[in-house]
Amino acid sequence: MKHILTMNDLSNEEIYGVLTRAKEWKGKQVPIVQDRPTFVANLFFEPSTRTKMSFEVAEKRLGFNVLDFSPESSSLQKGETLYDTVRTAQAIGASAVVIRHPKEGYYHELVNGVSIPILNGGDGKGEHPSQCLLDLYTIYEEFGTFENVHVVISGDVKHSRVARSNAYALHRLGAEVSLSGPDEWKDNTLPFPYIQIDQAVEQADALMLLRIQNERHAKQVNQSHYLEEHGLTLARERRMKRESIILHPAPVNRGVEMEDELVETKRSRIFTQMENGVYVRMAMLQAALQEGGELDAYTTEEHTHLTK
Amino acid sequence: MKHILTMNDLSNEEIYGVLTRAKEWKGKQVPIVQDRPTFVANLFFEPSTRTKMSFEVAEKRLGFNVLDFSPESSSLQKGETLYDTVRTAQAIGASAVVIRHPKEGYYHELVNGVSIPILNGGDGKGEHPSQCLLDLYTIYEEFGTFENVHVVISGDVKHSRVARSNAYALHRLGAEVSLSGPDEWKDNTLPFPYIQIDQAVEQADALMLLRIQNERHAKQVNQSHYLEEHGLTLARERRMKRESIILHPAPVNRGVEMEDELVETKRSRIFTQMENGVYVRMAMLQAALQEGGELDAYTTEEHTHLTK
Amino acid sequence: MKHILTMNDLSNEEIYGVLTRAKEWKGKQVPIVQDRPTFVANLFFEPSTRTKMSFEVAEKRLGFNVLDFSPESSSLQKGETLYDTVRTAQAIGASAVVIRHPKEGYYHELVNGVSIPILNGGDGKGEHPSQCLLDLYTIYEEFGTFENVHVVISGDVKHSRVARSNAYALHRLGAEVSLSGPDEWKDNTLPFPYIQIDQAVEQADALMLLRIQNERHAKQVNQSHYLEEHGLTLARERRMKRESIILHPAPVNRGVEMEDELVETKRSRIFTQMENGVYVRMAMLQAALQEGGELDAYTTEEHTHLTK
């Protein structure tokens, strides 16, 4: 696998590989004793709490030290290229690098010269594979399968960096996919049917609400209007199927995508998604590093489960 | 104990519990070997060197990994609520959270939904319990008791977030408490006598100087005037009792609250306070996590001293 | 050795001591198991990727925890002196401190009161000893000696904080030193001959290109002009001696000091320098802490190689 850059790069087998390993991590408290200090570098060029912290916990749980390249105090102020920064991380000893960067496809200029695995933590309006994989994991954990699970992805489909890749990945894993949301945010290049939110709540097994990314929109959304027309109100939640679940990548705009009180309602998996994110990212690092042979090199016999 | 939010929440027994454990930590170099990676999240929404670093050392000495949520690079820029940030820290695996926040009483909105211990690292003009406890520790270490120890708290009593809670805690532990400082900074709601600084230096066993918080004052203080009228000059220091000590929460405005040369004078305990702060914070974490049963869960037999 | 502040403070024996230890670190993967948590504080008051990260990796490889005092979130905003910040780091438990600060000779105000080793990570236009030592290491690694190795230091000699100290250190270790660069950046106080870049490429065993520090220059350099007149073009590189090498402290201004394609050419040691920087900084910490007796205190028998 080596680099993990887009969902499309991953075969179904590789996706199931990640989900399976993530489940193993979730089940146990395996003490990982690294026999020497090893490092993963995190390069986050956009604000992030969840993704950055989640990768950090995943890295530390696997026994890595974390090198935190924060742009505000780095040589990027001196005009250094991303390539040179990543090569620096490699030169001083990083075994892998996780990057979030505002430029879509930033990794194209990296993959030739960089010899450590790159994990894409989000590339502008491009992709966000670890978010997709944790969404998949949470659905798979709930239903034990993707076959005939009806997932409705609702909201700002056009600007989301998970909607598109989630939709395609879910589809090829056997799920039924529908979309929902305001007309101006429709993405008509996607071959999946659009339904109204009032249908969606009745039909969905998993209702995946997307975040309205105010920071990416020029004009502000009329927020109370959005909840009424397209969001998850208390009334709509009551009409959802008995076993259905709610997903949201967070942070939630409370009172916009969904009613405040629903964030921690029984069928909400929002904080479960965050917890699962750690296990999924551990599995991603594992997959990326095994391919490169790196993880073998510094594991001791006690944790050969890592290399199985 | 669980959360540690205000001094008033702590009984005398709980305070002595923290002081006793802190003393144990100070005396020995106990190797804490965590049997799996564990995490404490630090959320500091105001500048801090001392408190943040001190908690970080305390956490790492107890074997925790530290998750550093720095606001400048976090989703708080996306308008996320404090509650959601703390729930995120919990979801991704933090065993406890230390918070400094400019809003007085910020924790009221947290205590219902958050199930990990919250340690208050300072809430605006509210409280700063770890600073109080390290002040108490330093006095207790010096005199072996609070009974009949005369503590004079001197300076900006009105705006200080430690003066009030220190005064009450010292009083109920048996100390004699007086206040000192300029008229405009008197807090007449406190039932303790005001004395002039020239009396204070002669009467105090512990002279607790408060920091002038320029960053909280609209109009600047006339600094040289302050030292002359209310601060600790060289002449005043010479009139202090033989065994008396000087405390200051730091950073000192050198030449304002006290003469430059006095910061490291023999009776100054300013850097001792900083050192003690680490042990006190270790004891606070221990107290908070034992109540919640968390520390039991991940300690091994070798360090059962933690759970005794 | 204790503090490592300027190259001039180091005897030839001490320099060789660092180079020898660095080589030992490079050769092996020694598991350092600290028997209790220990700390090094990093205080970087100027942007830095390479130096800060490299020290961090060095510290963690030696088993230290790292305390990161970042100025943007520290009490320095409250006007605290550097001295008080460093004393704070010491009080809360740091065994050593690495400082980068814009003020030349910042350490003069520290050395009397601070009792832990200070490693200079760069003082304004002053010195940058860890960069010098890694340059020396990389040359020594290549040629096995400094005797009769011709090193040409080329570029902004006047404003560089490594040119001067590198030149003197190389000279007293037996190397032949020449300088090169535009007239306006000549430093005529240095007793070394100036040669043109076209001579330099033919004569140098090691061509040490200096970074044009745009952030320190008031007027911008005419960049393409600089490459043509004084930089390493493709044509010039082809005229270099067969076994000669290229050094650059990085980050490279690609297309200014050197042609883009040459950054990773066969004779370039730029990324090797970065890798070596970690081992050199491990050796510096070791040297500084042994003198202070600190490293002895917390090493266990398994790694007595540290104290040999």
Image (cartoon, coloured by chain):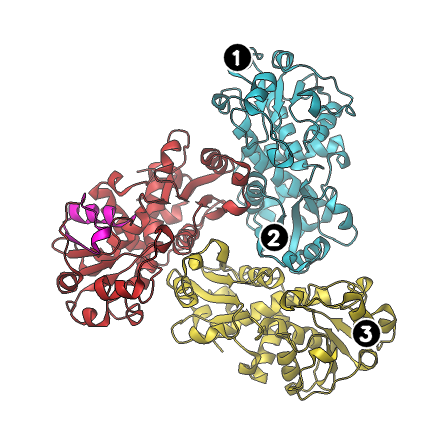
Chain colours: A red, B yellow, C cyan
Residue B109 among those drawn in magenta: no
Does the residue at mark 3 contact the one at mark 2 (Cβ under 8 Å)? no
Q: CA distance from mark 3 to mark 1?
A: 74 Å
* Label 1 and label 2 in one chain: yes
Mark pair 1, 2: CA separation: 44 Å
**Looking at the rendering, in which quadrant would you find the N terminus of chain C?**
top right
Q: Name the residue type under label 2.
A: Pro
Which label belongs to residue C235? 1
- Label 2 crowd bin: few (<14), some (14–19), many (20+), radius 10 Å: some
**Magenta segment:** A161-189
Q: Chain of mark 3?
A: B
Percent from the top left, x then y, of residue B27? 65, 67
Q: Secondary structure at mark 3?
A: helix
Image quarter for residue B17?
bottom right
Q: Specify few, some or many for label 3: CA neighbours under 10 Å numbering under 14, 14-19, or 20 or more.
A: some
| Element marked by disc 1 | helix
| Residue plotted at (77% across, 37% down) | C9
* Count of marks, rendered view: 3
| Image mark for residue B229 | 3
Q: Kindly report the distance in space between the C-alpha atoms of the residues bearing marks 3 and 2.
A: 33 Å
Q: Amino acid at mark 1?
A: Ala
Residue A270 drawn at (x, y percent): 30, 62
| Residue A29 figure quarter | bottom left
Could you tell me residue B8's position as x and y percent? 56, 82
Residue at the spot of label 2: C71
Confirm whether the magenta stretch covers residue A165: yes
Of A42 and B145, the residue lying toward us: A42
Name the mark nearer the viewer: 3 or 2: 3
Front-most of residues A257 and B151: A257
Residue at image location 52% in from the left, 75% down from the top: B5
- Quadrant in the picture for the C terminus of chain C: top right
